[in-house]
Amino acid sequence: MTIRRKSPDGKISLIKKITMNNDNSYFFLANGDLISQRKEQAFGVIDEQKFQLTALFDSSLPNMAYAICKGQVFILPQQGKESDTVNLVLKPYIQPLTGTKIKYFIYRGLQRADFFTAGQSPLVIATDSSDFVTTINRGFANLYNNGEIPPFKAEYIGFEAGFQSDNLLSSIFFKTSVLSSDNNIITESDAYELPMIDIGKSLGRFKQGECGIDVVLDYGDFENPQDESLFQLDLAYAGAQKAMIDLSGMTNDYKKKLKREQIAQFLDIAAFYGSQVNQGRVNSVLGERKGTAIYENLLQQFFTKNKVYVYIQSDRGRSYNFYNNYTISPTANTCIFKGEIENTLTESAYQTLGWPLLIDDQVQNHDLLENKLLLRFPIDYNNHVGCYVQSGKLQASAIDGLITREELSEQTVPGAVRSDYTKPVVLLHPNIGPSGSKIPITTFDRLLYQGKKINYLGLEELGIETALTGSLNDIFDQLNAVAVFKGSEENANSTLAIHKLKLVSPYYNKDQKGIWATQTVVVKDRLDFSNDVYRVTYHAEAIEAKHRLIDSGEAGVDTRTSASTLQSVGSGDFNRLNAGGTFDFVYFSDYQLKVPGLILTSSDGKGVPHMQIGLVKSENERILEAIVTSGLQNVQLMLLDLHGAGNQFISEEKIAYKKYRLALSGENTEGRPTLYQIEQDITVYTVDQYTYFSFLYASSINDLYGMPETRNSYVTFKIN
C-alpha cells in the first residue's frame, strides 16, 4: 500500500509498504505464575565483564513448554546433564514479530524422559506425552503405510546423531545429505529429518529447578568465522545450561569491543512478549492476552518486567558511537542526550556498564497511556544522515519508522547556524500504574542512526580526500561470508541475504534525497549461454523507502526483499532480484573502451527497488584476496570517485557517466576505520547511480541478449 502526502510547499512525499502489526506468538508456559526469576538469573548486564544471554528462571514443578511459533525442532543433550536433561532449539518457520526476525528460540532444561528412552541407543518414546511426541510418532508410522513399524531411533530426528560441539546450528538445520554405495548397500550421511511443530503445541516439560530460554535474532543464513563480532551459534552454545558473554581475562580493548557487539543478537524473552503489548497478541493455554493483560498475566514473575532495552546500530553496522565519532564530552564518555521532557534532556553515554545498550526503567509522572523516551544525536548534515526505527513505536508522523535528514534537522531562521544536534526522536513505550507513577512495561527498540562522517585512516596515502561520494559506500559487508546451503559455486547459483539493515540515501535527479532502509544481498550465478562467465552482484534492496519528489507525477519505490537460496545452474538467468524491472543499455566511450552502460528502470511505474554493484567472479576474487592481505575486520566495499570531485564524465557520445575504483574499508588492529587499496584496480561505472558495473559484467549481459552495438541510444531488455 502506498500513501501520497502533500506538504505545505506542494512537494509530494511517498511512503511505501504501510503494514498493520500482525504480531502473534504463544507463551512458552501455561501461564506466567509457574516460574520465578531472581536478579542474578535475569537476562542482561551482570557487571562490566559479563552479560547474560539466557533468561534463567526457577520452575517449582515440571511445567509443560509450548511452541512460541510454528517452526522446526532440534533436540540435544544438555551439557553436564546428558542423562536426564535436554535443550530444544525452535527455528521459526513463521515469524512471530513484525520488523524483527528471530533465528532461534532455545529452551534450556527440558526433561529428557518426555522425549526419549534411556540407554545408549535411545528411542522416541511411544506415549502421548506431548503434542510434539504424538505428531512425530504419527508421521513416522505413516511412512510405513500401516505395515511393520521399525524402532523409532532418536537419531532419526537428530538427537545424538554424532555431531561435534563446534558444529554450527545452521549446519544442522541446513544439512545436505550425501548418498554413498558400498557393496551395493546405499547409505545416507546425515540421515535425519528435523520435525516441524505448529504454534502453541506442547513440546515437553521443563524440569523442576533452574531452566532458561534464549531469543536469538537472525542476521542471515551465512557463516563467517573471521567475524569476531558474531556470536558463535554452535552446539556448545545450544547445549549449555546457560549462555553468557564473559570478557574476564581479555586485555585487548578492541577485541573486547567486538565481543560486546554480540549482545545485539539477543533479546530478553520478557521484552519479546512485552513488545506485543501495544498492538500484538500473545496466546496461551489459558486464552488470548492483549494489551496490559500480557504484562499482568504473563510477565509478573520476570525481574526484568519493567526494563526497556534500546539497541542503536550506527555506521558500518556497528553499535552507536563504536568509532567515537558522536562523542559529546570525551571525559564523561557522553554521546547522546536522553530523557522524558525535551527541555530537560541530559548528556548520557550509550552504554550500561560498558555494554552497548540503553536500559530505561524510569517511573514517569503523568497520566498518559505510554511513557516517552527522547533521544537527541550529534549531526553534521552530510548526505547520508538518516534514522530508521526498525522495531519500536515513534510518536512522530514518520510512517514505517524512516526519518530523513530534513526531518531530523532543527528548524532555523535563514542564515542562522544549524544546531549540532538533531531534533528529539521520541519513542513511546507501554506503561502500567496509577496517574503520576507510570512504570514502563518491558519492551525493546531497535534503531539505525547515522549522522556524522567517519574519519578514515589511509585517505592521504590514497590521495582521495574528496573521493568518498558514493551512495553505496559501507553498505555491503560480510564480503567473505559463505551461505549455509551446501553447494559449490561450480554447480550452483546462490543468493545470500544479510538481514542486518543499512541506511542508503539514493539519488533522484542527480541529488541525494530521502532515505532507504536496505537489506543487502549477494547473488552468485553463471550465465546459461556460457560456462565461462561467473558473476557476483551485490544488491541493496529497499525494505522501506521514503523520499521527497519535485515532480508529483513521479512514482514511488515498490519495496521487496529476497531470501537466501541455492539453485542449480541451467535454471535460467538467476539474477532476477528486480523482477518486474528492465535493463536499459546505452553505449559510451571511456577513452578507447566502448562500454555497454546498464540502467535499471521500472516496467511497472513504481520505481527501482534496489541499487547494485555488478562484477565478474575474477574481479570479486581479487576483493577476497585483498581482505586477507589487509588484515582488517568488518570489511566493506567503498567507491572511490575517479573524477575526484563527485562530478560526471561526458563521453564523446554525450553520455554522462561516473567512474569509480573499488576499495575496501575496515577496522585495523586498534579498531580504527581504515581504507585499503586493492592492488589491481577494479573499475566500475554508473550512468543512473543505481546500477554500478564493471566493463566485463556489463559485457556479459550485453552478450547474453545478443544486442548489436547501438550508438548514442537506449535499448530496453526485459529481465524477467
Image (spheres, helix red, strand yellow):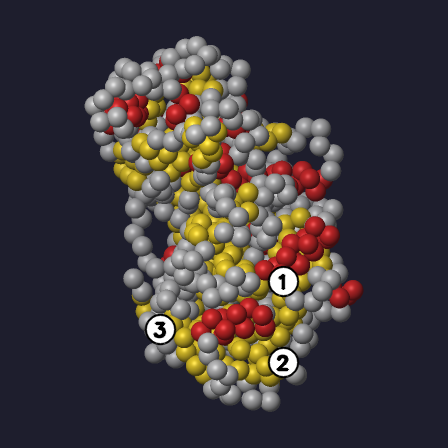
Q: In this view, does 78 lie above or below 694?
A: above
Indicate the amino acid at tag 2: Leu
**Residue drawn at 43 percent across, 63 percent down:** 573
- Residue 342 position, x and y percent, is 49, 53
Q: How crowded is mark 1: few (under 14 residues within 10 Å), some or many (20 or more)?
A: some
Q: Label 3, on which residue? A: 603
Q: Is residue 705 visible?
A: yes
Q: Which SS class for mark 3?
A: loop
Could you tell which of marks 3 and 1 lies nearer the N-terminus?
3
**Residue drawn at 46 percent across, 32 percent down:** 181
Indicate the amino acid at tag 3: Ser
Could you tell which of marks 2 and 3 lies nearer the N-terminus?
2
**What label sits on residue 593 in the rendered view?**
2
Q: Which of 386 and 228 is in front in this view?
A: 228
Q: Label 1, on which residue? A: 619
Which quadrant is home to the C terminus? bottom left
**Residue most toward the top?**
119
